[in-house]
Image (tube, rainbow, N blue to C red):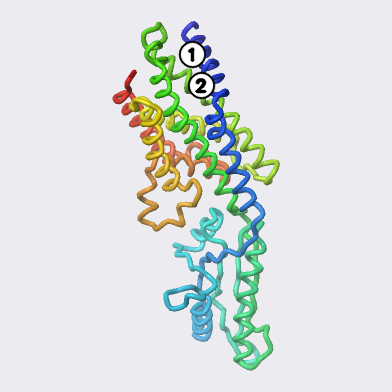
């Protein structure tokens, strides 16, 4: 009982100390909330047209193939057509395209059906192109349909007939896709966990080394485990404050919809934070002073941020680079938060992410123990 009481006493004392340190409060609490406000204003109400499209040209008629090929040649961006409207995304099949659209990697699916280009009773070809867009993103579907309607109207005109033989049908996907803000908030939650786990501990421990507090604790009945657990508990409380404000701003200001299970999200984020504490302990335990710790922490932090999809979705990176960043410590954290919050994933579906986090947890804590210095 006294063991845990000591930890709680240390945590309360350290939390009071952190509360008096305005730098910690700014970087651990205020800055993450500022990022939510910034990205929320940029993305939550954005209705700008995105040009990423999965295209299926299934026309079986010779005329249909010819017309659809010429249309796509003019509308799809390529090395020979820099002014094209659509960026064609490579997908395996229609189901893969729908899955990518849910994840925000594809904005619309354009489908030329098998009967496109069939000869009508007038003796001239006809056809209807289907545009499928994400639920809640009707502006993208409308703009895409408008572009195709204009292009096919020109085909009708060149064939000397009134526009209507070639038409466009817009269909909203039954499954709601991700918005830019959905990606942003998932990455920002991961960013907050990184700041608490890495930047907090890595600077606090060297500060105690400098003041001699760590040396005095080492000589007292307080064990190193109690000392470190007390610090971790203090930063967990600080993280809870930051995350609570972030969730409140996202939900009540920007109407963010949590589609997964809250308990699953909380447990996963706590497990991720325990792993990220390992990075802070390794850096702070090795560093002799705050200056050395700050430099090393920044060296670790920036690759973690920019290679893990914290601010920019990883699917925008080249494929080979995405595979390399799969094993960056923060990548499974961001991916897991996004999958829970936006796709309602459970622990069974998150086993790959949990496995990578668990592996990093072991590696980081073994490293922290090996390099830890009391002075």
For label 2, the crowd category at 10 Å Cα-Cα, with few meaning under 14, some 14 to 19 and many 20 or more, is some
Q: Which of 200 and 54 is in front in this view?
A: 200
The residue that appears at 37% across and 43% down in the rendered structure is 327
Q: Looking at the rendering, which quadrant does residue 297 occupy? A: top left
Q: In this view, does 142 lie above or below 313?
A: below
Q: What quarter of the picture does the C terminus occupy?
A: top left
On the image, numbered disc 2 is attached to which residue? 233
Residue 125 location, x and y as percent? 59, 87
The residue lying at 43 percent from left, 78 percent from top is: 80
**Disc ID at residue 7:** 1
Picture coordinates of residue 15, whole percent (x, y): 54, 20
Residue 178 in sight in this render: no
Q: Could you tell me which residue is drawn at 60 percent across and 74 percent down?
A: 129
Q: How crowded is mark 1: few (under 14 residues within 10 Å), some or many (20 or more)?
A: many
Residue 129 lies left or right of residue 315; in this view the side is right
- In terms of depth relative to the viewer, which is nearer, 257 or 312? 312
Res. 98 in view:
yes
Distance between the alpha carbons at the discs numbered 1 and 2: 8 Å
Is 291 located above or below residue 147 in the figure? above
Q: How many marks?
A: 2
Please report contact status of discs 1 and 2: CB closer than 8 Å, yes or no.
yes
The tag earlier along the polypeptide, 1 or 2, is: 1
| Residue occupying image coordinates x 57% and y 23% | 20
Please determine whether, in this image, residue 310 is positioned above or below residue 166. Answer: above
How far across and down, in percent of the image, does residue 114 sit? 54, 76
Q: Where is residue 70 in the image (x, y as percent from the top left)?
A: 50, 82
In the figure, 132 relative to 214: above or below? below
Tell me the element at label 1. Answer: helix
């Amino acid at each position: 009982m006294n063991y845990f009481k000591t930890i709680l006493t240390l945590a309360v004392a350290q939390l009071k100390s952190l509360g008096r340190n305005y730098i910690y409060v700014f970087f651990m609490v205020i800055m993450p909330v500022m990022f939510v406000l910034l990205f929320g204003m940029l993305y939550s109400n954005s209705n700008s047209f995105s040009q990423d499209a999965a295209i299926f040209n299934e026309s079986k008629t010779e005329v249909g193939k010819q017309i659809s090929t010429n249309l796509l040649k003019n509308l799809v961006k390529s090395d020979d057509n820099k002014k094209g409207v659509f960026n064609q995304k490579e997908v395996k099949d229609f189901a893969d395209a729908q899955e990518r659209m849910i994840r925000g990697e594809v904005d619309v699916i354009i489908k030329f059906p098998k009967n496109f280009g069939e000869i009508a009773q007038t003796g001239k070809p006809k056809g209807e192109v289907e545009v499928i867009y994400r639920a809640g993103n009707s502006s993208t579907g409308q703009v895409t349909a408008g572009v195709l309607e204009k292009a096919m109207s020109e085909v009708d005109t060149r064939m000397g007939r009134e526009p209507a033989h070639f038409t466009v049908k817009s269909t909203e996907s039954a499954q709601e896709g991700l918005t830019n803000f959905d990606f942003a908030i998932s990455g920002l939650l991961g960013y907050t966990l990184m700041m608490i786990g890495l930047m907090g501990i890595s600077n606090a421990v060297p500060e105690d080394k400098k003041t001699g507090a760590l040396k005095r604790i080492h000589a007292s009945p307080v064990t190193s485990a109690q000392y470190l657990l007390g610090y971790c508990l203090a930063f967990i409380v600080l993280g809870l404050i930051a995350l609570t404000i972030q969730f409140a701003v996202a939900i009540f200001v920007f109407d963010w919809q949590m589609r997964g299970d809250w308990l699953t999200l909380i447990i996963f984020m706590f497990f991720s934070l325990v792993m990220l504490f390992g990075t802070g302990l390794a850096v702070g335990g090795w560093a002799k002073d705050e200056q050395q710790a700050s430099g090393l922490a920044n060296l670790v932090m920036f690759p973690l941020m920019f290679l893990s999809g914290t601010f920019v979705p990883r699917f925008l990176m080249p494929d080979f680079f995405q595979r390399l960043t799969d094993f960056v410590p923060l990548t499974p954290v961001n991916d897991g938060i996004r999958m829970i919050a936006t796709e309602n994933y459970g622990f069974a579906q998150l086993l790959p992410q949990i496995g990578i986090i668990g592996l990093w947890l072991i590696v980081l804590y073994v490293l922290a123990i090996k390099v830890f210095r009391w002075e």
